[in-house]
Image (cartoon, grey):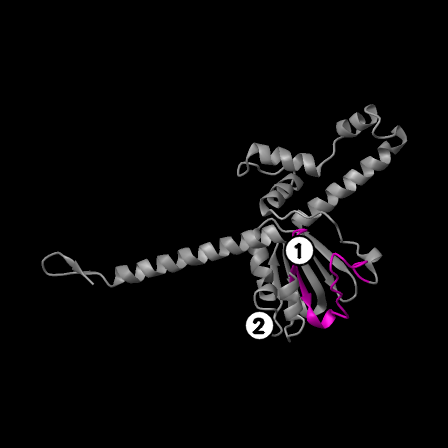
């Protein structure tokens, strides 16, 4: 993340991209950037306004498969057929804290009864943040207004925002981004010049990219097969030749 951003900030691209261990692929409009602080782990802080970083979280999960499970948990329980049962339970136990677990801490004298509601609220807030990181696409306008959408169709998510990440936004030339959240039922057009940044769940974006690339390869193979078939014709003896 550091190498790419450090390089891109010294260039002349319309957007720069950052990928974090908190499952965020963030495309930032270059002209919306006032300053950027790079701080090592040995430095004292993350920047002059670190207390105001509302989206900052120390939750770092490198494995995209875990984020897929978190997204499935967030979306009404989700479909877990593609995951091993032990992985689902491991992630569920890490993400969610049940009332029974909190009450057990009280029973073991590891938590004061007076702290129960506070800890329950903290656990719920943490769960909500992780669910949001796994499912919500967020973009912010220059006015500070934010939009949040849960885009279930991963291909649509990738096709909407790949010009910002794959081509640094340089190919847009006045075009609007088209985000089909739920097919024809909900379509959003976004002016990339009007936004400061867009943050996309990395696992959804990458899965969408894989699907789009696979579909493209299938179409190319089908087209090649059709061309090959059109070049095959019968000879007088009933054989075929190319």
- Residue at image coords 30%, 62%: 227
Q: Does the CB distance between marks 2 and 1 fall below 8 Å?
A: no
The residue at the far left in this view is 237
Most common SS among magenta residues: loop
Would residue 113 be counted in the magenta stretch? Answer: no
Image coordinates for residue 62, horizontal then vertical, percent: 62, 48
On the picture, is 64 further left or further right than 229? right
Q: Which mark is residue 83?
A: none
Q: Label 1 crowding class (10 Å Cα cut-off): few <14, some 14-19, many 20+?
A: some
- Residue at image coords 69%, 37%: 94
- Residue at image coords 45%, 54%: 214
Residue 114, by quadrant, is top right
Instruction: Give the mark toward the camera: 2 or 1.
Output: 1
Residue under label 2, please give it.
171
- Could you say whether the residue bearing mark 2 is in a helix, strand or loop? loop
Image coordinates for residue 233, horizontal then vertical, percent: 19, 61
Height in image: 112 above or below 216?
above
Residue 37, by quadrant, is bottom right
Say which quadrant the C terminus sits in.
Answer: bottom left
The residue at the far top in this view is 107
Instruction: Please state the total of marks drawn on the protein image.
Output: 2
Image coordinates for residue 63, horizontal then vertical, percent: 60, 46
Height in image: 52 above or below 168?
above
On the picture, is 213 further left or further right than 235? right
- Could you say whether the residue bearing mark 1 is in a helix, strand or loop? loop
The magenta stretch spans which residues? 18-47
Tell me if I can see residue 117 in this picture. Answer: yes
Residue 89 vs residue 201, the one in the foreground = 89
The residue at the far right in this view is 114
Q: Residue 20 carries which label?
A: 1
Q: Label 2 crowding class (10 Å Cα cut-off): few <14, some 14-19, many 20+?
A: few
Say which label, 2 or 1, has the lower sequence index: 1
């Amino acid at each position: 993340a550091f190498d790419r951003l450090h390089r891109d900030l010294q260039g002349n691209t319309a957007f720069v991209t950052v990928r974090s261990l908190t499952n965020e692929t963030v495309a930032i409009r270059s002209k919306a950037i006032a300053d950027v602080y790079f701080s090592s782990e040995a430095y004292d802080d993350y920047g002059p306004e670190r207390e105001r970083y509302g989206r900052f979280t120390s939750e770092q999960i490198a494995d995209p498969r875990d984020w897929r499970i978190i997204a499935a948990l967030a979306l009404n329980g989700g479909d877990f057929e593609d995951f091993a049962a032990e992985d689902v339970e491991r992630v569920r136990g890490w993400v969610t804290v049940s009332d029974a677990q909190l009450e057990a801490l009280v029973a073991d004298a590891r938590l004061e009864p007076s702290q129960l509601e506070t800890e329950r609220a903290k656990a719920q807030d943490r769960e909500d943040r992780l669910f949001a990181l796994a499912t919500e696409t967020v973009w912010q306008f220059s006015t500070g207004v934010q939009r949040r959408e849960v885009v279930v169709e991963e291909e649509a998510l990738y096709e909407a925002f790949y010009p910002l990440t794959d081509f640094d936004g340089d190919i847009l030339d006045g075009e609007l981004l088209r985000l089909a959240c739920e097919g024809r039922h909900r379509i959003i057009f976004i002016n990339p010049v009007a936004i400061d940044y867009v943050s996309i769940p990395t696992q959804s974006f990458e899965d969408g990219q894989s699907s789009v690339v696979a579909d493209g390869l299938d179409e190319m193979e089908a087209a090649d097969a059709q061309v090959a078939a059109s070049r095959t014709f019968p000879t007088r003896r009933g054989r075929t030749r190319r």
